[in-house]
Image (cartoon, rainbow, N blue to C red):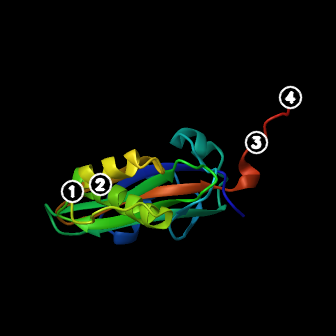
Amino acid sequence: MVPTHMFLTRGVGVHKEKLASFEEALRSAGVAYCNLVSVSSILPPHCKIIPRKRGEQLLKPGEITFCVMARSETNERNQLVSASVGLAKPTDRGTYGYLSEHHAHGETDEETGEYTEDLAAQMLATTLGVEFDPNVAWKEREQVFKMGGKIVQTLNITQSAVGKKGKWTTVIALAVFIPPENVPSRPRR
């Protein structure tokens, strides 16, 4: 099975029970009705990124659903938690790309999101032979990657939240793969 479509989503859940907090985050992300299986971080060649709403419509309740998931949780009041999935797509759609996940405490949405985007781009750049200095800031490396012509797009989806007194707070970010058999085939012309 090689997925041809995927979507990005995120969610937050708050509950007195840790597991229920995670369930609430899954509901917020729109995937609580699936049996999620975490996989490593390869974006398949030719995999199209579709809107969340369309992706949710292509999943079936109880279905085994592969995803790349970032998850962070806390039961400490006022603690900032964040979860992010970053993506780097190559210019050549026939080549695979990378997804990266990061879970953090005390990082803002922007910090966590930039980190995952940078990490995915670095992993893709090293497989494509793009030379870069890992010690310069992400914004500078991003320009090197894109001007090199081998990486066409980087992006991230990030969720953060602040812990509440006496409750568990869970944040998740996911890249959800659609099973190929769930994608309607287009009529040939």
CA separation in Å, label 4 and label 2: 43 Å
Q: Viewed as shown, does residue 58 lie left or right of 74? A: right
Q: Please name which of the two marks, 3 or 4, marks the residue nearer to the observer.
A: 4
Q: What element carries label 2?
A: helix
Image quadrant in which the C terminus is located: top right
Amino acid type at mark 3: Pro
Q: Viewed as shown, does residue 136 lie left or right of 41? A: left
CA separation in Å, label 4 and label 1: 48 Å
Q: Label 2, on which residue?
A: 141
Please give the name of the residue rendered at 40% of the width and 58% of the height, measured from the top-left corner.
121
Q: Which of 85 and 34 is in front in this view?
A: 85
Q: Please name which of the two marks, 3 or 2, marks the residue nearer to the observer.
A: 2
Amino acid type at mark 1: Ala
Amino acid type at mark 4: Arg
Q: Residue 137 carries which label?
A: 1
Instruction: Report how many numbered discs are placed on residues in the image.
Output: 4
Expressed as whole percent of the image width and height from the top left, the position of residue 144 reads: 33, 51
Q: Label 4, on which residue?
A: 189
Count neighbours of disc 2 (C-alpha within 10 A) and say few if under 14, some if 14 to 19, many if 20 or more.
Answer: some
Q: Residue 99 carries which label?
A: none
Q: Label 3, on which residue?
A: 184
Amino acid type at mark 2: Arg
Check whether the beta carbons of the residues at disc 2 and disc 1 lie within 8 A of each other: yes
Chain-order first, disc 3 or disc 2: 2
Image quadrant in which the N terminus is located: bottom right
